[in-house]
Image (cartoon, grey):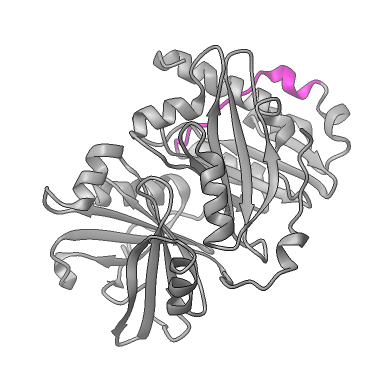
Amino acid sequence: MKPSVDIQSANTSVDFLPLLGTDYIEFYVGNAKQAAYYYMNAFGFQALAYAGPETGVREKASYALRQNKITFVLTTPLRPENDMADHIYRHGDGVKVIALRVNDAHSAFEETTKRGGKPYLEPVTLEDEWGKVSLSGIHTYGDTVHVFVERNEYSGPFLPGYKPWSNPHFKPEATGLLYVDHCVGNVGWNRMNVWVKFYEEVMGFRNILTFDDKDISTEYSALMSKVMSNGNGFVKFPINEPAEGKKKSQVEEYLEFYNGEGCQHIAMATNDIVKTVSALRSRGVEFLRVPSTYYDDLLNRVGPIDEDIEPLRELGILVDRDDEGYLLQLFTKPVQDRPTLFFEIIQRKGAKSFGKGNFKALFEAIEREQALRGNL
């Protein structure tokens, strides 16, 4: 099936859930202090805000980090036998909240719940000396949730309940990461269309791109994927499910080790992928590698590009082209011991697609890692 990109059709109807982009992503982790240090040191995030016992929050500690328009929150429970501790026991470190910026959190909650969204957070307004923020939320696949954030009347560092946080002796240099391009969800067998329908009916998204098991397959494994986009194209959520293959696919491995459905990877945009990946690699971030032969006929496959081939070959950066232009992308290895969450670094030079031409080489690289883990 030939994929097609159709963001325009998503703009033809009234958008009952106008989204301004990704506000923050919250991870539940076993040790938030150490996780924050990792994302600062390895990825170049900066200290932003903190909530914990010292700020009057008794049940958890949360560290908010920022780089340009990307905000990560690392949260750990301070005691066992609660939802946060259960989430970490079940899934390991992983994404709990994909928060979306809105102009009206109450309206977002009403519009989505009346269309079938399961409530996660009833609308609430929080206030402190910097103003007020309204929040609401709904459940999505697995234990993942969407929180709607209305912060038009707030000038504080992050959210009420957080205090400014910085370490004057530790300010690692940024790596050029700009904003969240997309977040990918892995769901179970025959569940992709269930969640496609959820995003269409509950959140007003549109399916702008479809890949079947002929598009995304290797000798051993396959998966299927549909890309969901909101009306203005600011928020995109590809949804993956496994497909039949000779051996275990990457989605099956994820579902087994995450113990359920969840966010597989977060794609972060850069304007200079060579510079960004070089910086990340020098700080210890490990990336998947494709064979050097991938680059031998690269220009024949994708046409002329602005970048020199040799730095791309050295760093393992992949290139693909669609009708709008081309993109460059590279994927990290999982960033925790369970083979679950990883990151994508992406630079778009006009392309609006997701690298279909790289799927085979990429997934063969993933399978080599799976084989080393004994999970293929």
Residue 318: name its quadrant.
Answer: top right
Q: Which residue is at the front of the view, 350 or 250? A: 250
Is 27 within the magenta?
no
Q: Position of residue 186 (x, y in %)?
A: 48, 38
Residue 52: name its quadrant.
Answer: bottom left
In this rendering, the answer to whether 302 lies above or below 131 is above
Residue beneath the point at 65% across and 27% down: 213
Q: Which residue is at the front of the view, 189 or 41? A: 189
In this rendering, the answer to whether 52 lies above or below 245 is below
Task: Give the residues drawn in magenta, as a range.
Answer: 284-296
Residue 275 visible, this angle: no
Q: Main secondary structure of the magenta part?
A: loop
Residue beneath the point at 59% across and 72% down: 18
Q: Is residue 206 left or right of residue 285?
A: right
Q: Is residue 50 left or right of residue 26?
A: left
Q: Position of residue 293 (x, y in %)?
A: 73, 17
Q: Position of residue 63 (x, y in %)?
A: 30, 60
Residue beneath the point at 41% across and 83% down: 154
Task: Name the quarter where the N terminus is drawn.
Answer: top right
Q: Which residue is at the front of the view, 8 or 300? A: 8
In this rendering, the answer to whether 143 lies above or below 241 is below
Label tally:
0
Residue beneath the point at 76% across and 24% down: 295
Q: Is residue 206 left or right of residue 32?
A: right
Is 288 within the magenta?
yes
Q: Position of residue 301 (x, y in %)?
A: 84, 29
Residue 85 visible, this angle: yes
